[in-house]
């Protein structure tokens, strides 16, 4: 049956990498007989310019009715000090669709290992499960001239469902270890987080479980990254730790993600932003978007063969030494995309 995929290209390098992702999807779909239609919608800065708001009603409606959503990136410097910003649209979309579980896998490509600023990346393979619709992102924000306040809220139920999601992911992985990351030595939300984490861990006796404070976790990600299998953490910590983890891979430009709600709808996006510093030059690394397409095929459509085809082609392209600028190479976005398509 025809699947409807809503695409949100957004700002900066967004349209450049979305184009790359969709080119790959066209080729893979042909090979695996995957039938789909694309509906592109305005989102982020481009939507602010057209309609005065980053998440127009029409974009939200189409996203709600989609079988899956592909998002490239939003954000641009001209909105930085404005009351209405592209990022508000991203948070509103995640909240409106209930996309509470954000999956950010880290894979080290052998051909990239020597390019990582971190020396010790052999056998690193973990996934960050980031709670995406709660925490300080969605608490009350108050900004006055001489003081400001951001409220961090978590309910037991919000913690329980992301914990269960993480334990279910751990069950699919060979090492079966969950590391729950918090700041329990200071924050009330983390004290609740830890209590609920312990309760959920008791439901999964087949999964090894440990706690880690977020500050030492940030250190171990660099010094002993092999230690981790499934990291589960709150919204803000997950944002920071997953960007940190990308340094192990060598670049943010290879980091895809999926975000799931409780009803089977998911959104797929790179973890990085709109990269204004390189936008418009045709040199962005498209791999984060292309791997997000692979995650979509697997997680929303059960198309394991198509997903693996893309992942193997990316690995082979790196092995053949074809690299974009962020990895010290000279391939353009188009050249990298073409090279991946040739290896499908
Ligand atoms: N989900 C999203 O859409 C998302 C995520 C993060 C940041 N943002 C927004 O993006 C804007 C820029 O933020 P930032 O500069 O802090 O972070 P960024 O992730 O956009 O860029 C950080 C650095 O990584 C590089 N980079 C990122 N993606 C790359 C790619 N595919 N290929 C090559 N290099 C890449 C950039 O050139 C830059 O040097 C901000 O407005 C921010 O709010 C959006
Ligand atoms: C753009 C920003 C609001 C967003 C976040 O903090 O969630 C981004 O950094 C991400 O990781 O998707
Ligand atoms: Mg981020």
Image (cartoon, rainbow, N blue to C red):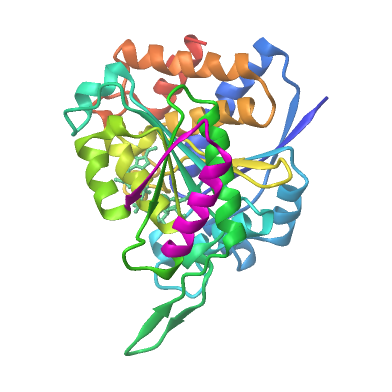
Going 68% across and 61% down the picture, which residue do you hit? 56
Picture coordinates of residue 308, whole percent (x, y): 54, 16
Q: Residue at x 61, y 13 (%)?
A: 305
Percent across and percent down for residue 284 are 38, 35
Residue 71 at least partly seen: no
Point 27% across, 22% down: residue: 112
Q: Relative to residue 76, is residue 269 depicted above or below?
A: above
159 relative to 249, above or below = below
In front of the other: 171 or 60: 171
Which image quarter is the N terminus in? top right
* Magenta range: 190-213
Establish if 84 lies above or below 42: below
Taking the image as four quarters, which one is ligand 2 found in?
bottom left
Question: How many labels, in total?
Answer: 0
The answer to whether one can see residue 108 in this image is: yes
**Residue 270 percent coordinates (x, y):** 47, 40
Q: Does residue 134 lie above or below 175 as drawn?
A: below
Q: Residue sitting at 29 percent across and 47 percent down?
A: 217
The question of residue 290 being in magenta is answered with no
Where in the figure is residue 29, as x and y percent of width and height? 66, 18
Q: Nearer the viewer, residue 17 or 127?
A: 127
Q: Please name whichever residue, 177 or 198, is drawn nearer the observer in this view of the structure.
A: 198
Left or right placement of residue 191 versus residue 21 in this view: left
């Amino acid at each position: 049956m025809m699947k409807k995929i809503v695409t949100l290209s957004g700002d900066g390098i967004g349209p450049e990498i979305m184009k790359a992702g969709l080119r790959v999807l066209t080729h893979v779909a042909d090979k695996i007989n995957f039938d789909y239609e694309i509906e592109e919608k305005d989102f982020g800065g481009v939507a602010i310019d057209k309609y005065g708001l980053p998440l127009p009603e029409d974009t939200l409606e189409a996203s709600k009715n989609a079988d899956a959503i592909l998002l490239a990136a939003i954000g641009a410097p001209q909105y930085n000090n404005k009351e209405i910003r592209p990022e508000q649209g991203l948070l509103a979309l995640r909240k409106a669709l209930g996309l509470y579980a954000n999956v950010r896998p880290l894979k080290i490509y052998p051909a990239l290992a020597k390019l990582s600023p971190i020396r010790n990346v052999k056998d690193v393979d973990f996934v960050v499960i980031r709670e995406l619709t709660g925490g300080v992102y969605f608490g009350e924000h108050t900004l006055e001239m001489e003081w400001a306040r951001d409220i961090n809220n978590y309910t037991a139920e919000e913690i329980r469902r992301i914990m269960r999601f993480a334990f279910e992911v751990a069950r699919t992985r060979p090492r079966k270890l969950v590391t729950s990351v918090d700041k329990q030595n200071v924050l009330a939300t983390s004290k609740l987080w830890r209590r609920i984490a312990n309760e959920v861990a008791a439901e999964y006796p087949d999964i090894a479980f440990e706690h880690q404070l977020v500050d030492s976790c940030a250190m171990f990600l660099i010094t002993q990254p092999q230690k981790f299998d499934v990291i589960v953490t709150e919204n803000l910590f997950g944002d920071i730790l997953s960007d940190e983890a990308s340094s192990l891979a060598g670049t943010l430009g290879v980091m895809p993600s999926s975000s799931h709600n409780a009803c089977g709808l998911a959104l797929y996006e790179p973890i990085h932003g709109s990269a204004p510093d390189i936008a418009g030059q045709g040199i962005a690394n498209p791999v984060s978007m292309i791997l997000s397409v692979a995650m979509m095929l697997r997680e929303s459509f059960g198309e394991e063969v198509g997903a693996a085809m893309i992942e193997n082609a990316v690995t082979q392209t790196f092995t053949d030494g074809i690299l974009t600028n962020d990895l010290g190479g000279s391939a353009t976005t188009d050249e990298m995309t073409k090279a991946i398509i040739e290896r499908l």
